[in-house]
């Protein structure tokens, strides 16, 4: 029997024994094994591995709801969790909006899993690091290669019982020369998909191409955003726009049924698809499945846990988060769909080797820019206006001026202030790249999949001098 599933059942039985059959209880057991190989100054300086099991219990007793968690998973630790959570429920205010427990339902499919990645050795991660460093050709390098194996189970007193497992491998690294950084980020189900040589060569080429940047004045520029930059757009759309709590409280830009994006934009949250990562159910036991957030420019859905779904009069979508009701629910595997093959522009011969090591798909977008900027990455982004999703932030890891379809010179970093939905509104999206890249986040709990985007305008509000 799955050990996490057995543990979850045991905790539900302990609640029943302590408080009677009238108490509603749900248990989420999450086991995560993270292995990380970190390097700096082109040397591995840290190799760590950590495996931990967390148990989250939520109970609803006498109209009151409380939750607790523990990593002490022996019998005494679980007994303490049960006693502490039941005692907390007696002190909590009445919960008139309790949505009830998830009813028994089968999983929509299995999560993505790779046995070799789950049991990857430090030497296998070090091989990727060595290949990255060698391919950088003497440039200073830093970053990490990690693998994650996750297994989990959910059981509640209403009869729902599900279990699953998943793997993730990721590289996030830079090469540096003369103060110029080139970055690569890539996540996959399989460590075998991460080619250190290719990634290191790309990072080094971008770093070399970013030397001696010029300063441009602030203003609105036509842009090609590489997938690393588009990932920030996807992340903010997901966490602040397609969040069910934000939508219920009218803090979100999302208007269901409204054409809020260009018709070329389709956004799908697909945890079980080819680029999906994570468990096949959420911490409330709701099975995950593909959810179309935007269909050909029209906003169709937001992510819901059980509470926000009940408030909105709809069904939960499998996006509850372990932090609880106050955190809302947001997509964890959103993907902007790439251009269809018949719509994707073809890069002119040789353009895949232009200065900043732009891939052929992105190069095809650059070739269509009369005068604008090629942007690698955004960072330190903060939301100024959640209702319009106006975000401010900085460019990072490479910006280049594009003139008449060719990259001409590196540009110093710029600050921007931009409404993300307006940047993708009807008529604002010139073209979409033909392929996507999946990006990891720091904690291995969400992933953003994006193509490159050619946009008509991006509002840069400050230069390197202020």
Image (cartoon, grey):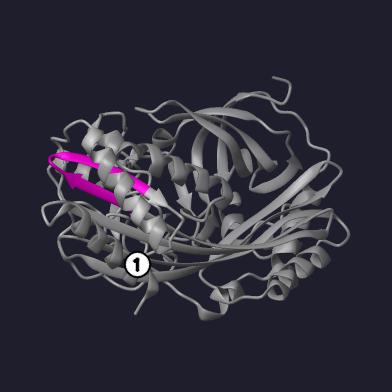
Residue drawn at the location 43% of the way across and 63% of the way down: 74
The answer to whether residue 382 is left or right of residue 299 is right
In the figure, residue 158 lies in which quadrant?
bottom left
Q: Is residue 457 above or below residue 70?
A: above
The answer to whether residue 49 is left or right of residue 336 is right
What residue would you read off at disc 1? 7
The answer to whether residue 427 is left or right of residue 286 is right
Residue drawn at the location 16% of the way across and 65% of the way down: 159
Query: Quadrant of the image for the C terminus?
Result: top right
Residue span colored magenta = 56-68
Q: Is residue 392 on the magenta stretch?
A: no
Q: Main secondary structure of the magenta part?
A: strand
Whether residue 347 appears in this view of the structure is: no
User: Could you tell me residue 201's position as x and y percent?
Assistant: 76, 63
Q: Is residue 108 above or below residue 264?
A: below
What SS does tag 1 mark? Answer: helix
Q: Of residues 414 and 161, which is closer to you in this image?
A: 161
User: Could you tell me residue 385's position as x and y percent?
Assistant: 41, 24
Q: Residue furthest top?
A: 466
Residue drawn at the location 39% of the way across and 63% of the way down: 75
Q: Is residue 105 above or below residue 114?
A: above
User: Could you tell me residue 50's position as x and y percent?
Assistant: 59, 62
User: Could you tell me residue 441's position as x and y percent?
Assistant: 54, 51
Residue drawn at the location 45% of the way across and 65% of the way down: 275
Q: Is residue 65 on the magenta stretch?
A: yes
Q: Of residues 184 and 24, which is closer to you in this image?
A: 24
Q: Residues within 10 Å of mark 1 (few under 14, many from 20)?
A: many
In the figure, residue 239 lies in which quadrant?
top left
Whether residue 372 appears in this view of the structure is: yes
In the figure, residue 276 lies in which quadrant?
bottom left
């Amino acid at each position: 029997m799955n050990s996490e599933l057995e543990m979850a059942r045991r905790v539900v039985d302990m609640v029943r024994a302590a408080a009677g059959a009238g108490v509603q209880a749900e248990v989420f057991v999450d086991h995560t094994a993270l292995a990380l190989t970190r390097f700096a100054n082109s040397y591995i300086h840290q190799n760590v591995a950590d495996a931990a099991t967390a148990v989250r219990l939520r109970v609803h007793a006498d109209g009151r709801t409380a939750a607790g968690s523990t990593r002490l998973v022996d019998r005494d630790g679980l007994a303490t969790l049960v006693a502490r959570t039941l005692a907390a429920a007696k002190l909590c205010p009445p919960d008139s909006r309790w949505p009830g427990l998830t009813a028994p339902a089968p999983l929509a499919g299995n999560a993505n899993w790779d046995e070799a990645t789950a049991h990857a050795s430090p030497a296998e991660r070090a091989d990727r690091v060595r290949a990255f460093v060698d391919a950088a050709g003497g440039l200073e390098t830093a970053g990490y290669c990690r693998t994650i194996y996750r297994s989990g189970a959910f059981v509640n007193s209403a009869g729902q019982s599900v279990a699953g497992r998943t793997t993730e491998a990721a590289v996030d690294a830079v090469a540096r020369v003369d103060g110029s950084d080139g970055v690569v980020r890539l996540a996959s189900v399989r460590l075998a998909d991460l080619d250190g040589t290719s990634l290191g060569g790309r990072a080094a080429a971008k770093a070399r191409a970013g030397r001696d940047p010029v300063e441009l004045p602030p203003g609105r520029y036509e842009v090609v955003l590489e997938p690393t930059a588009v990932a920030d757009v996807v992340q903010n759309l997901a966490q602040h726009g397609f969040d069910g709590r934000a939508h219920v409280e009218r803090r979100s830009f999302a208007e269901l049924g409204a054409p809020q994006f260009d018709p070329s934009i389709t956004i799908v949250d697909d945890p079980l698809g080819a680029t999906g990562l994570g468990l096949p159910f959420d911490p409330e036991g709701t099975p995950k499945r593909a959810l179309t957030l935007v269909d050909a420019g029209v906003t169709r859905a937001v992510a819901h846990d059980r509470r926000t779904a009940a408030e909105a009069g709809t069904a939960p979508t499998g996006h509850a988060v372990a932090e609880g009701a106050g955190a809302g629910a947001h997509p964890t595997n959103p993907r902007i769909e790439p251009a269809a093959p018949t719509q994707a522009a073809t890069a002119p011969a040789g353009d895949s080797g232009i200065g900043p090591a732009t891939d052929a798909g992105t190069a095809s977008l650059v070739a269509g820019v009369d005068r604008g900027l090629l942007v690698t990455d955004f960072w330190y982004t903060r939301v100024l206006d959640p209702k319009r999703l106006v975000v401010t932030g900085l460019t990072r890891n490479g910006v280049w001026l594009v003139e008449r379809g060719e990259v001409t010179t590196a540009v110093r970093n710029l600050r921007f202030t931009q409404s993300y939905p307006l940047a993708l509104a009807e008529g604002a999206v010139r073209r979409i790249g033909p392929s996507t890249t999946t990006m990891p986040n720091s904690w291995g709990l969400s992933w953003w999949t994006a193509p490159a985007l050619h946009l008509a305008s991006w509002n840069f509000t400050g230069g390197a001098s202020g």
